[in-house]
Image (cartoon, rainbow, N blue to C red):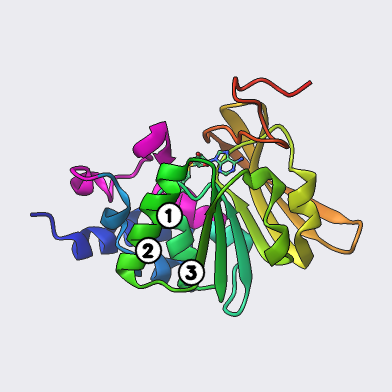
Amino acid sequence: MLDFAYARHRMVERQLAARGVGDRQVLDAMGEVPREAFVPDGMEEFAYEDSPLPIESGQTISQPYIVGLMIQAAGIRPGERVLEVGAGSGYAAAVMSRIAQAVYAIERHEPLTRLAQSRIDRLGYDNIHLKTGDGTRGWADAAPFDAILAAAGGPEVPAALKAQLAIGGRLVMPVGEEPRLQRLKKLTRISQAEFREEDLGEVTFVPLIGEQGWGEDEQRRP
Ligand code: SAM
C-alpha cells in the first residue's frame, strides 16, 4: 500500500516547489487535499504521478503542476470567492476551497458532478458549490468572483466570464485556435471596461464545450 501522505509531500516538493510554484498557501493546500480521493477506483496508486490522468466520462484530472500553476497565477486569497469552469473530478475545487472563502464549480457532465460532490462531502469540505451546466455562461447568481479558473480550453474568453469578474479580479484560462492546443491566459480586470492580459505559456487542455466555447464536434460555432 502506497504511503499517500509521503507521496503527496514529495509531489509538493518535486513537482511544484522545485518548478516555481512558490505560493505557500497553494503548496499547503495541495499538501492537504488527498488527490487519491479524486481519481477513479483502482487508479489511486497513480494519483501523485507527474501527469494528467483519465477520469470518468472520458475526461481528465489535470497534472498537479498545472493545478498549482493556475491557482498561483489566479492569486487566490482567504476571504475570496472563486468560480471554476470544468470541475471534473472536483480536485482543483477542493484545493482552492482550502484557501478561498467559497468555491463555485460547474461541470457539464452530470456523472462527474455527482462523483465530485460525493468526494467533497466525504472529505467534509463545506464551502464548495457544485452544479451541472454550461460553464461558459458562468454562474450569474453567485457573481461577481474575485477569481475565475477555466480548466478547459476555448477559442476565446467567454464574455459572460469577463462580465462576472470583480474589478481587481483575475481570470486564468487556456485559449487557442485549436481545440486541444492553447496558451494559458491571465486577465486582470482593471476597471469596468479594461482588462490586462498576460500570456503564461503553452498548455494542452480538453476543449471547453458550450455556448461560448467550442461546439460538441470541437468546431467553432457559426
Ligand atoms: N479541474 C478538474 C479536476 O481537478 O479534476 C479537471 C477538469 S478537466 C481537465 C476539464 C473539464 O471541463 C472536463 O471535466 C469537461 O467535462 C469540463 N468542461 C468542458 N466544457 C465545459 C463547460 N462548458 N462547462 C463546464 N464544464 C466543462
Q: Are marks 1 and 3 in contact (CB under 8 Å)?
A: no
* Place of residue 81 in the rendered image (x, y in percent of width and height, measured from the top left): 63, 70
**In magenta segment, residue 49:** yes
Query: What element does badge 2 sit on?
Result: helix
Which SS class for mark 3? helix
Marks 1/3: CA distance? 10 Å
x 69%, y 55%: residue: 171
Q: Residue furthest left?
A: 1
First of labels 1, 3 by sequence position: 1
Q: Nearer the viewer, residue 205 or 197?
A: 205
Does the residue tagged 1 have its C-beta within 8 Å of any atom of ligand 1?
A: yes
State the residue at coordinates (42%, 36%). 59
Query: Going from the N terminus, do you reach mark 2 or mark 3 first?
Result: 3
Q: Image quadrant for the N terminus?
A: bottom left
Amino acid type, mark 2: Ile
Q: Which residues are magenta?
A: 41-70
Q: Nearer the viewer, residue 159 or 186?
A: 159
Asked which quadrant contains residue 43, the reply is top left
Q: Amino acid at mark 3?
A: Ser
> What residue is pinned by disc 3?
97
* 117 part of magenta stretch: no
In the picture, the disc for residue 70 is: none
In the rendered view, tell whether residue 189 sits above or below residue 152.
Answer: below
* Residue 153, position as x, y percentages in the image: 61, 37
**Residue beneath disc 2:** 120
9 sits to left or right of 133: left
Say if mark 2 contacts mark 3, CB within 8 Å: no
Give the residue number, with chain letter if any, for mark 1.
90
Q: Where, quadrant-wise, is the C terminus in this rendering? A: top right
Estimate the x, y position of residue 39 in percent, counting from the top left.
30, 47
Q: Are marks 1 and 2 in contact (CB under 8 Å)?
A: yes
| Label 1: which secondary element | loop
